Amino acid sequence: LGSAGVGAGKTVTVSGLTLSGAAATNYTLASTSATTTAAITAVTLTPSVTAANKAYDGTTAATLASCVLTGVIGTDVVTCSGSAAFGSAGVGAGKPVTVSGLALSGAAAANYTLASTTATTTASISAPTVTATVTASNKAYDGATSATLASCTLAGVVGGDVVTCTGTATF
């Protein structure tokens, strides 16, 4: 083939043609070479993805950590990228992540196609640390160590999440 890249109607040159068979000596080739056309089709690659773990931020946004392609030939340079999203925004381990819009890039990308433009993996969302600030009510001496929690506010709560704190107060 004229070049190794994917394409249709590519010129194929055959050289060194010879005759064989019982009656081959009764014939002479007009030429020892000939041309025709053929197509080179793209190789299908299978993507395997990983997503980065993250701290809870109230969104389903995820980060694609890696996209490994199975089926790349030789030293061809082909990479993939896409957009990742958790199935839900809540804290948890082994949460499903879908990577969509996978696309190929790199010097040899035109010679390949993806088996699927989506892939799945899992990653974790960890709980953020919040800090409580409390106040207690003053009281008259009563001989007891009990106290009344007047307020408890939290620093570090994400976005508009509603999180409160309570507790038992003692002197």
Image: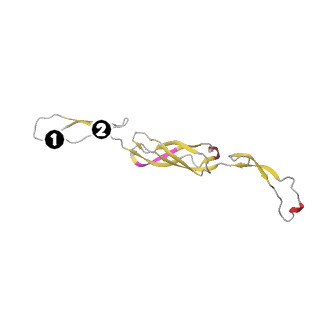
Residue flagged by tag 1: what amino acid is it? Ser
Query: Can residue 121 be found in the magenta stretch?
Result: no
Quarter occupied by residue 144:
top left
Identify the residue under disc 1.
146
Q: In which quarter of the image is the C terminus?
A: top left
> Residue shown at 43%/39% (left/top)?
59
User: As drawn, which residue projects farthest toward the right?
Assistant: 26
Q: Residue at x 89, y 61 (%)?
A: 26
Q: Residue furthest bottom?
A: 22
Cα gap from disc 1 to disc 2, whole angstroms: 23 Å
Disc 2 crowd, CA 10 A, few/some/many (<14, 14-19, 20+): few
Q: Is residue 71 above or below residue 59?
A: below
* Location of residue 20 in the rendering, given as x and y in whole percent from the top left corner: 83, 62
81 to the left or right of 8? left
Observer-nearest residue: 89 or 77? 77
Q: Residue 1's x, y, as percent?
A: 73, 49
Q: In this view, does 21 lie above or below 113?
A: below
Residue appearing at x 86%, y 55% in the figure:
29
- Nearer to the camera, 124 or 152: 124
Using the image, tell me which numbered label, if any, was put on residue 18.
Answer: none
- What main secondary structure does the magenta stretch of the protein show? strand
Helix, strand or loop status at disc 2: strand
Secondary structure beneath dot 1 equals: strand
Q: Nearer the viewer, mark 1 or mark 2?
A: 2
Q: Which mark is residue 131?
A: 2
**For the residue marked with disc 2, what is the amino acid?**
Thr
Looking at the image, which is closer to me, 63 or 160?
63
Stretch in magenta: 93-99
Q: Which residue is drawn at 51% across and 45% down?
A: 99
Q: Is residue 161 above or below residue 121?
A: above
